Image (cartoon, rainbow, N blue to C red):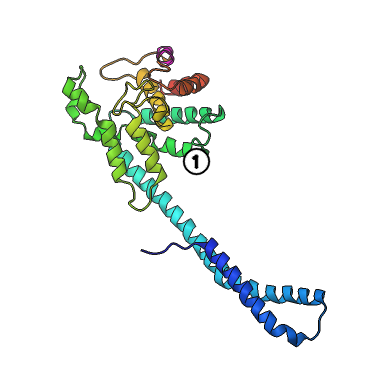
């Protein structure tokens, strides 16, 4: 196993070694300068030590540090490219068995962005909901139902009520999606994009009161990313036409979500939803 380069330890070692060696050389050569005052000896000591230390540090630390930083930047860019490529492939996989339209995906991503930014501006989950993390959350939003690739078409497309067995199978899709995403993780490095997608896909059917699935989590045990996704996804599902139902009005969907605050949905996320009502309506009406 290759030992990781530690620039701080190297710098400390080089500084200590160069100072010790420099002082030894100065003590050896100092008598050749003749009798000097205390101040003169001090000044000469500083000058000689500087002349010895700076070239050593530049040779032993600065050049390796530059290479280390260049390699780090390259590695970060490689990870970003790899994540984007993987995201594209996973999105294609999700769409292969998803009955939702491209418009639904775009709207849901916009809703997720509105809720996440509103929560951040309200001062909630500010350490988690950074600009970078919100961007990741928006990117992975289309993967929330990735697990449906493991559900048979006759169940996905069924217009009537599910049997108990069909419902159990349908309710397994969050775990299927989570497993697919977990398998796509790098073995030696956790990718934050995929980690965020796992939280969305695996937990977006949990409910605030613990009555959701697949783990019956409650409250803040449910990742905030999933709590945001839930409200965004349910809102768009309610107002959208489906083969088996006519879409609700915006007002009906709004009332439904508010009435289930504290039971199905995180009350704080619902507050953000209320604050963003007009923006939600504007996005919904663009496709009507």
Q: Which residue is mark 1?
A: 132
Left or right of 164? Residue 22 is right
Q: x and y percent of residue 38 in the render?
A: 81, 75
* Residue 257 vertical placement versus 215 (above, below): above
Residue 281: image location, x then y, percent: 47, 19
Residue 223, placed above or below residue 39: above
Q: Residue at x 38, y 28 (%)?
A: 103
Does any portion of residue 97 appear in the rendered image? no
Work out whether residue 32 or residue 80 is closer to the camera in this orientation and state it: 32
Quadrant containing the C terminus is top left
In this rendering, position of residue 111 left or right of residue 156: right
Q: 82 above or below 228?
A: below
Task: For mark 1, give the secondary structure.
Answer: helix
Residue 195 magenta: no
Q: Is 276 on the left-hand or right-hand side of 37?
A: left
Quarter of the picture containing the N terminus is bottom left
Nearer the observer, 272 or 50: 50
Q: How many marks?
A: 1
Residue placed furthest toward the right: 37
Q: Position of residue 138 (x, y in %)?
A: 43, 35
Q: Which residues are magenta?
A: 251-259
Q: Residue at x 48, y 58 (%)?
A: 72
Most common secondary structure along the magenta stretch: helix
The answer to whether residue 15 is left or right of residue 69 is: right
Does the image show residue 91? yes
What crowding class fits label 1: few (fewer than 14 Cα within 10 Å), some (14-19), or many (20 or more)? few
For the point 41% across and 27% down, the residue is 227
Horizontal and vertical percent for residue 211? 32, 21
């Amino acid at each position: 196993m290759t030992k990781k380069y530690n620039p701080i330890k190297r710098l400390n070692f080089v500084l200590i070694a160069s100072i010790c060696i420099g002082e030894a050389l100065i003590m050896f050569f100092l008598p050749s300068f003749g009798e000097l005052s205390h101040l003169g000896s001090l000044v000469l000591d500083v000058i000689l030590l500087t002349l010895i230390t700076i070239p050593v540090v530049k040779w032993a630390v600065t050049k390796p540090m530059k290479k280390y930083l260049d390699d780090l930047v390259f590695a970060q860019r490689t990870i970003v490219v790899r994540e984007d490529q993987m995201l594209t492939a996973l999105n294609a996989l999700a769409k292969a068995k998803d009955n939702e339209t491209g418009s639904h995906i775009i709207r849901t991503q916009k809703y997720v962005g509105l809720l996440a930014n509103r929560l951040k501006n309200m001062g909630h989950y500010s350490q988690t909901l950074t600009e970078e993390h919100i961007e990741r959350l928006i990117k992975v939003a289309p993967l929330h139902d990735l697990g449906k690739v493991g559900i048979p078409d006759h169940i996905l497309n069924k217009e009537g009520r599910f049997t108990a067995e069909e419902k159990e199978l349908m309710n397994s899709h969050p775990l299927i999606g989570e497993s697919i995403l977990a398998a796509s993780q790098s073995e030696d490095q956790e990718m934050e994009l995929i980690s965020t997608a796992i939280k969305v896909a695996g937990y977006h059917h949990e409910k605030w009161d613990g009555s959701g699935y697949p783990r019956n989590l409650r409250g803040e045990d449910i990742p905030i990313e999933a709590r945001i996704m839930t409200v965004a996804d349910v809102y768009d599902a309610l107002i959208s036409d489906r083969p088996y139902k006519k879409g609700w009005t915006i007002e009906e969907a709004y009332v439904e979500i508010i009435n289930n605050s504290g039971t199905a949905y995180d009350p704080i996320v619902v507050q953000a939803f209320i604050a963003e009502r007009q923006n939600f309506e504007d996005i919904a009406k663009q496709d009507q």
